[in-house]
Amino acid sequence: MMHTTLLLAGLSALLLVVGQALGGHTGMLIALIVAAAMNLGSYWFSDRVVLRLYRARPASAQDVPVLFDTVRMLAQRAGIPMPKVYLVDSDAPNAFATGRDPEHAAVVATTGLLRIMSRGELAGVMAHELAHVQHRDTLIAAVAATLAGAIAMLANLFQWALIFGGGRGSDDRDGGLFGGLLMMILAPIAATLIQMAVSRSREYAADARGAAIAGNPLWLASALRKLSAGSARAPLQTAERNPATAHLFIVNPLRGRDLAQLFSTHPPVEERIRRLEAAGRGLVA
């Protein structure tokens, strides 16, 4: 959690620096207010949007008894309310959680996931998603998105200022213009990298807590190995069309994971498996 706090503090500091360099205090305030309003709306309604986007259908104990019973048992272990359970009809094996807090949460599994997981592996995956719910990672993601969005908005404001007559004047202003242009290009990239680092750090935390809820880290390690191979064979088409939702899933659902690791919202699967297997060996010892 300290790592996440430091990353969020870094985003906040970057916002202040960018606001001062590009838009002054007024521009910074306007961008922050607009970005906060946009992301607050996303926080309250994003669960409905993403469920509709992926055509997720409610699942009952009669539809998928193993999944439903597993989620109910794990929620009791975690000490959180039973979330709603949804299914997405897709051969791509994956899962995600959504909802603004544990009282308004939902866990989603693809039909491809259910086909390839053992009971223990399924418990590992669902425990990981319930860990996200318990940690309120949707709130953390909303805060990070607000700050990153405000930074990007300030850069856009500066771009429009240039179009409508900015940059004329003395050598000092020319120097300031160059610095502003550099900030306009680099600041959104830096903000995106920090935002993704927040997401990656929450994945590690959810792995650790999920392993504790399930009771066996090796279940999740084995599930991640299957998920990584299965996702490479059958990418999730809806995620390909909507890459902004990729961070929701337990493994990256997009193509090109190896080529774009720097800009990935997920840590390397191999490192996640290594940590889980080390935890499993610790339990045996």
Image (cartoon, grey):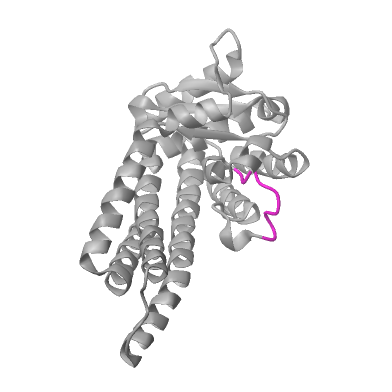
Is 223 or 171 nearer to us in this picture? Answer: 171
In this picture, residue 44 sits left or right of residue 248? left
Q: Main secondary structure of the magenta part?
A: loop
In this picture, residue 107 sits left or right of residue 136? right
- Residue 253 within the magenta-colored segment of the rendering: yes
> At 50% from the left edge and 51% from the top edge, which residue is drawn?
204
Residue at the extreme right of the image, as rendered: 233
What x and y, as percent, mark residue 23? 29, 68
What x and y, as percent, mark residue 253? 64, 43
Residue at the extreme bottom of the image, as rendered: 171
Which residues fall within the magenta stretch? 251-259
> At 36% from the left edge and 82% from the top edge, which residue is drawn?
168
Is 123 or 40 nearer to us in this picture? Answer: 40
In this picture, residue 224 sits left or right of residue 102? right
Q: Is residue 164 above or below residue 232?
A: below
Residue 214 seen in this snapshot: no
What x and y, as percent, mark residue 48? 44, 27
Is 167 or 149 nearer to us in this picture? Answer: 167
> At 65% from the left edge and 54% from the top edge, which residue is drawn?
270
Residue 173 seen in this snapshot: yes
What x and y, as percent, mark residue 177? 38, 81
Q: Is residue 250 above or below residue 279?
A: above
